[in-house]
Amino acid sequence: MNYIPKIDRRSFVVSAAAMGGGLALGLDIPFGGPQVIRAQNGSPEINAWVVIRPDDTVVVRIARSEMGQGSLTGLAQLVAEELECDWSKVTTEYPTPGQNVARKRIWGDYTSTGSRSIRESHEYVRKGGAAAREMLIQAAANAWSVPAAECSASNSVITHKPSGRTTTYGKVAEAAAKLEPPADVKLKDPKDWKIAGKPLKRLDTQDKLTGKQLYAIDVKLPGMLYAAIKACPVHGGKVKSFDAAKITGNKGVKKVVQVDNSAVAVVGDTWWQAKTALDALPIAWDEGESAKVTTASIAEVLKAGLDAQDAFVGNQKGDAKAAIAGAAKKVEATYSYPYQAHACMEPLNATVLYTPDKCEVWTSSQNAEAALAAASEASGLPIAKCDVYKLLLGGGFGRRGRTDYVTQAVLIAKQMPGTPVKLLWSREEDMTQDTYHPTTQCRLTGAFDANGNLTGLHMRISGQSILATLAPSRLQNGRDTATFQGLNPGGTEGVFGYDIPHLLIDHAMRNPHVTPGFWRGVNNNQNAIYLECFMDELAHAAGQDPLEFRRKLMAKYPKHLAVLNAVAEKIGWGQPAPQGVYRGLAQQMGYGSYVAAAVEISVTGGNKIKIHRIVGATDCGYAVNPAQIERQVAGSFVYGLSALFTGECTVKDGRIEQQNFDSYDVMRIAQMPKVETILMPSGGFWGGVGEPTIFVAAPAVLNAYFAATGKRIRSIPLKTHNISFA
Amino acid sequence: MAEITVNGRTHQVDVDPDTPLLWVLRDTIGLTGTKYSCGIAQCGACTVHVDGVAMRSCSVPLSAVAGRQITTIEGLAQNGVLHKVQQAWLDHDVPQCGYCQCGMIMAVAALLKDKPKPTDADIDTNITNICRCGTYQQVRAAIHAAAASA
């Protein structure tokens, strides 16, 4: 990433305009056009996605955000593949969301949530690369006065076949940028890929090893001050009063400000001074009725929802209730899933320079356009007078799709026009004001006929809707369809993979005051535990092998079945396990990908689990970078297993009790199991990668724990059952 | 005014002596490779070397390091050559978001000084840094590679 957030180099919109480079605001030509648009160093833009410098450096524009998931490299591979450029000369940069708005969203969607960065933009970024290639070839052909059809491009070199003449992209870029883009381009068949589809190393590693890599927390602007903030620990509460006089004389303290009606911030010469003063500042909160809420009281509300009449149906077939009523045998179990924090390594932060004429934000965001909108709203300035400069994220996991921290930073900076202010949340603030993995309960009831066939299943989910709090406009007649992730009757996102004659999956929405959020894997996490552990329970009740039991129900879902079979085979299912080792497995479909996991564990003393192996399989349709996908599989297992073993945020007096990693423990290297990845892209569709495999780690371990001990664990984390890593 | 030596360079800093070293490095001296994440010595993102020993700089006051040699991630490579741990990280494509990696690398560099050929058990005991992206599998492979390289 070559974007350096210095005030003298703040955006190429500014510098391109200043250079008279012809940046036409509102230009709406998808793949460039006759007016040459220039990057800030003057190099011509072939089209929105590709800039080529005279030294043949290829700058690929990346609209999505990089937070470790590797899509910056993957998207560059897709563009480079079609561009036929020299991969060793590829670098990347982020166009700002302000530029995107000014150019009628030429770069499309900026969000990096829902494992969408590649699967939802692969086509137009590849077309961008292909169109640029055609224009470069045409420019060379024009220079040689030969038909473009006689020329070809490879590795950034254009060759005129009949004469053997060659030139490079850098030499013809200026002329290519002036050409009309081709009306249409043909994309390569993925089986012909040479750059995409290969296990290439990431483009952004070197600076991460030397301390040079800048994250938003590292931004430094001339004259910048630092802000620490505390919002009402009971979500929805307000500031009643605070005694600024107590700290205004403290060394380095510049200003004590109220932020919105919910928070107080101290601005100081250094963050440590601001934070120390804030800790000493007496603040009285109006916490409201929610201050009485506890984890137990939330559980009671959710429990009542398990029997409520008011439920939204997510998936229905036949008459499950009648099948259950008439069943020869009935199996029932209730599961639950707690609140969990994201705990990104980089605490939330944003740096803002506000003047009455402009509001600029330096931050890391999974949704930079929403951050831009937040900056506009909080500053009161129109979008055209705001911009957001994106930096690499020190973790996102869904949390940085929200813009609450950007709003706060703008509201603080607005009270100090002309002075840049960096707002940094302490870890304690980050954990107190998170948007938590939502809490739900689920009662599952299965019906068998006299021959031991599963005839009916009812899943009643009760609990929190993310959309109801964060995006009520996306509810459908009050119903949160995202609640049914992985349980849907059809579609391309997350299809329920079992064929059961009578099925009912419904949701009684119960929304506590604690703010929920999108958390890597989102609702798939609990849904996979509920369904896949219960399938194990049903298999056990029917006296059948868990794999064979599933297979009989999955004939109509061959892709679901294929990944399950793959992990079963690799783990050695059906073969004797080593002495004292037990196996479990699980499958799910989410974000367009089919995933499964199988584990081998041993249990000591009934409560110490050693995970010897975990095999993960994913069919994500096309694999743009197998090496990075393997890393996402392993990384997702770490996130998911941390959640399984220790991930819980409890509520007392209306507030989240956990404040830091001492009370919210996460996996370390000592607990890391051996991860074996099976990448089995079957083609014909594009599934996500960053999230899907997370769903299946926890249920596979829970099923293995049952195999080892005969005990079903139906609530997580395991620490609440006094179970830990060995 | 206090004096500290970081990466061989002496700095005069005008901050309270109880200010954690982390914030002196980041906000006063401007070396931002040392990261803040927990502030309570749990995660290791702020790991630096003090007289060659790995320490979590968020929990070390400035007053405790006067007159001692501090090395940060910016001072680990010598004469433009990556330290063998950094090189192993590059070869194994270890980082994902990368935020924890500077601290992780500093912790590993100190471990290899004490135990040039660490076993997996040595790694489990000594490397307790948190990585939320979950790079541990690559981290372990890279530690063994770095140990084998010298």
Image: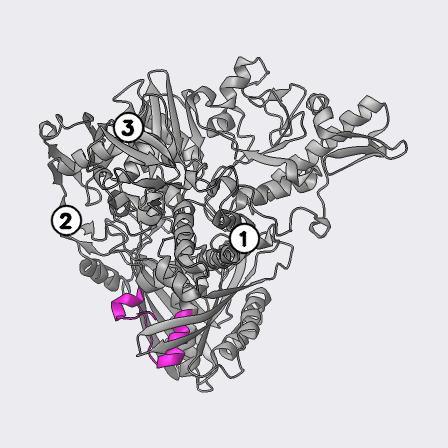
Position above or below: A84 against A514: above
Of B146 and A541, nearer the camera is B146
**Element at label 1:** loop
Amino acid marked by disc 1: His
| Amino acid beneath label 3 | Gln
**Which is more foreground, mark 1 or mark 3?**
3
Mark 2 to mark 1 CA distance (whole Å) = 49 Å
**Is disc 1 surrounded by few (<14), some (14 to 19) or many (20+) residues within 10 Å?**
some
User: Disc 3 marks which residue?
Assistant: B12
| Closer to us: B64 or A698 | B64
Residue at 13%, 39% in the rendered image:
A285
Question: Is disc 2 surrounded by few (<14), some (14 to 19) or many (20+) residues within 10 Å?
Answer: some
* Residue A395 in view, yes or no: no
Label 3: which secondary element: strand
Q: How far is mark 1 from mark 3, CA to CA?
A: 39 Å
- Chain under label 1? B
Q: Which residue is mark 2?
A: A291
**Residue A709 in sight from this viewpoint:** yes
Q: Are marks 1 and 3 on the same chain?
A: yes
* Disc 3: host chain: B
Q: Nearer the viewer, mark 2 or mark 1?
A: 1
Q: Residue at x 38, y 31 (%)?
A: A219
The spot of residue A3 in percent (x, y) is: 50, 30
Residue A672: image x %, image y %?
42, 63
